[in-house]
Every structure is written in structure tokens, then in C-alpha cells.
Amino acid sequence: MAHVRRKIHDVHARVPTDITTEALQRIGELYAIEAEVRGCSAEQRLAARKARAAPLMQSLYDWIQQQMKIHSLKMECLHGKHYYPSGNSAGNSV
């Protein structure tokens, strides 16, 4: 996830757009969950990731795929998506 965030952040710093703003906001929600569970037991972290982060990861993945269809495949801010897990594994990589 850090690779995706870094790529989008770099583009956003140069030329902010609605897409980069939304992408960073969505990623920020995932980072917030991680911050909340930091220091919790492994079981608690896993439960939070499955219940809260996995749906957000899938939503982010679906949104990125939608943006790729709508906009040019060469859209620079989405290049980082290649670091993102493919298919249904999105929720398993939090």
C-alpha cells in the first residue's frame, strides 16, 4: 500500500486533482485503521483488518479499476496501482 500511496502523493504534490485527492483520502482511512489497532494483539489486529480494512481495500481496488477504465491507462497517478494486489486478494493484504 505504501507504494501506491507514495506514487499518488508525488503526483498530488505536483498537480492536485479530484482523483488524487480521493485516492489519498481512501488510503488515509486504511492508515487510520492501522493506527487504531497498533499495539493491540495480533488477533485484534486481524479482526479489525477483516471487518474494517478489507472492505475498504476492495472498494479502493474497485475504484482504481473504474478510474483506469474512465481515464487514460497512462494516467500517472494510477501507475502505483501495479503494486496493489490484483483480484479478490485485495482484502488479504492489509
Image (cartoon, rainbow, N blue to C red):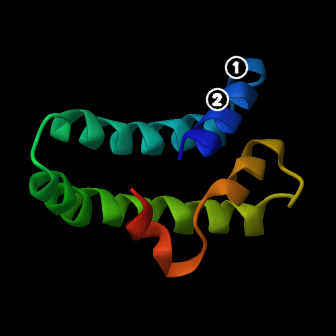
Total numbered labels placed on residues in the image: 2
Q: Label 1 sits on what residue type?
A: Ala
Give how far apart the Cα atoms at labels 2 and 1 are.
Answer: 6 Å
User: Residue at position x 25%, y 58% from top?
Assistant: 49
Could you say where residue 47 lies in the image, as x and y percent from the top left? 15, 62
Could you say where residue 18 lies in the image, as x and y percent from the top left? 62, 38
Quadrant in the picture for residue 12: top right
Residue 68: numbered disc:
none
**In this picture, residue 87 sits left or right of residue 51:** right
User: Dot 1, crowdedness within 10 Å: few (<14), some or many (≥20)?
Assistant: few
Could you say where residue 43 lies in the image, as x and y percent from the top left? 11, 58
Q: Are marks 2 and 1 in contact (CB under 8 Å)?
A: yes
Could you say where residue 22 lies in the image, as x and y percent from the top left? 53, 41
User: In what element is the residue under mark 1?
Assistant: helix
In the depicted view, which residue is nearer to us: 45 or 75?
Answer: 45
Q: Which residue is mark 2?
A: 9
Residue 13: numbered disc:
1
Establish if 53 lies above or below 38: below
User: Residue at position x 71%, y 48% from top?
Assistant: 80
In the depicted view, which residue is nearer to us: 5 or 70?
Answer: 5
Looking at the image, the residue that sits furthest to the top is: 13
**In this picture, residue 8 sits left or right of residue 92:** right
Q: Label 2 sits on what residue type?
A: His
